[in-house]
Image: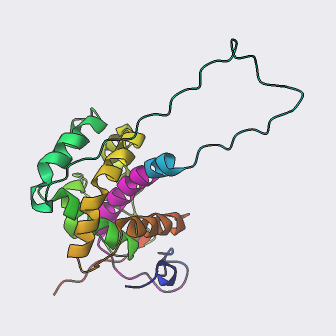
C-alpha cells in the first residue's frame, strides 16, 4: 500500500497547453465526485466531534469567583453515546438503514440506502479515493441520471458547464444531512468499517487512516479555471 504523500494527483489541463489529456470515463468522475461529497460530510462532522474543548480562560486575581450563593451550577457534560451492539458485516444493512434514516428527511436518501452491503461499499469507495482510483464500481447508485453533455468550440469538444447541474440532487441530499449525526453514526459503525478494511486485505488497518488520506487527497485536487477539453473514446 503506497503512502498517501507518495500519490501524485493528476491534473487535466486545457487542450491548448501541452499534449491532449488521456481519455477518461466521465461516469467514473461523476461517482468519484459523489463519494467525495459524502466523505466531506462525514469528515467535517467527525472533526467537530473530535476537536478538543476550548481551554479554560486564565483567572484574573482581581476578579474573584462569585460567592457560592450567587454562583450558577456547572453544566453537566453531555452523556456519551451508549455502546452499540453491532451485528456481523453480512447482517449489518438493516441496522445501517435504521440509523441513517434519521440523518435527513430528503426522500432520495432512502433510495441510496436500498443497495446491499452498504458498509462494504462505502469502505471500498473511500479506499479507492484514498488511492487516487475511481470508486465507480462500488457506488453506481449515486450516478446522476442526466446524461453527460459536451460543447464544441473551435473544432474541439469541451465539458459543457450545464453538466455540473447533474449533481444538484446529490448536493441537496448531502447538504441536508445532519453533520454531527452523520459523524456520530460513523463513530458507532467504525468497528464494522475496520472489519471491512481487514476483509479487503489490510489486516490491522484502521479505516480512520484511509478516511484521512481520502480527505487529504480531496483537498489537493485543483479546480479547473477553464472547461476541460475532451478526447473522444475510440472503440474498435
Residue 89 occupies which quadrant of the picture?
bottom left
Q: Quadrant of the C terminus?
A: bottom left
Residue at the (70%, 40%) spot, across then down: 56
Q: Residue furthest top?
A: 69
Nearer to the camera, 56 or 24:
56
Q: Position of residue 201 (x, y in %)?
A: 24, 80
Q: Which residues are magenta?
A: 18-43
Q: Position of residue 230 (x, y in %)?
A: 38, 73
Nearer to the camera, 53 or 183:
53
Residue 68 occupies which quadrant of the picture?
top right
Q: Position of residue 54 (x, y in %)?
A: 64, 43
Residue at the (35%, 53%) spot, across then down: 38
Residue 123 occupies which quadrant of the picture?
bottom left
Most prominent secondary structure in the magenta stretch? helix
Residue at the (12%, 47%) spot, across then down: 94
Nearer to the camera, 74 or 133:
74
Q: Is residue 118 visible?
A: yes
Q: Is residue 27 visible?
A: no
Rendered image coloring scheme: rainbow
Magenta stretch encompasses residue 57 = no
Q: Position of residue 17 (x, y in %)?
A: 55, 80
Q: Quadrant of the N terminus?
A: bottom left
Amino acid at each position: 500500500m503506497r503512502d498517501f504523500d507518495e500519490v501524485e494527483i493528476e491534473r487535466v489541463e486545457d487542450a491548448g497547453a501541452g499534449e491532449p489529456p488521456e481519455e477518461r470515463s466521465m461516469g467514473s468522475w461523476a461517482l468519484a465526485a459523489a463519494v467525495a461529497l459524502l466523505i466531506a460530510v462525514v469528515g467535517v462532522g467527525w472533526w467537530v466531534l473530535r476537536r478538543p474543548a476550548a481551554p479554560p480562560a486564565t483567572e484574573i486575581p482581581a476578579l474573584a469567583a462569585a460567592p457560592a450563593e450567587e454562583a450558577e451550577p456547572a453544566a453537566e457534560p453531555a452523556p456519551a453515546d451508549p455502546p452499540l451492539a453491532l451485528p456481523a458485516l453480512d447482517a449489518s444493512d438493516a441496522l445501517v438503514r435504521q440509523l441513517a434514516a434519521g440523518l435527513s428527511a430528503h426522500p432520495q436518501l432512502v433510495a441510496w440506502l436500498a443497495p446491499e452491503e452498504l458498509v462494504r461499499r462505502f469502505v471500498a469507495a473511500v479506499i479507492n479515493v484514498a488511492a487516487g482510483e475511481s470508486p465507480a464500481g462500488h457506488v453506481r447508485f449515486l450516478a446522476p441520471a442526466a446524461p453527460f453533455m459536451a460543447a464544441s468550440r473551435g473544432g474541439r469538444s469541451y465539458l459543457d458547464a450545464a453538466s455540473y447541474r447533474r449533481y444538484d440532487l446529490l448536493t441537496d441530499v448531502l447538504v441536508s444531512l445532519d453533520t454531527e449525526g452523520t459523524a456520530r453514526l460513523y463513530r458507532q459503525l467504525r468497528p464494522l468499517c475496520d472489519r471491512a478494511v481487514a476483509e479487503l486485505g489490510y489486516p490491522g488497518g484502521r479505516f480512520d487512516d484511509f478516511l484521512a488520506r481520502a480527505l487529504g487527497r480531496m483537498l489537493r485536487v485543483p479546480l479547473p479555471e477553464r472547461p476541460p477539453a475532451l478526447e473522444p473514446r475510440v472503440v474498435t
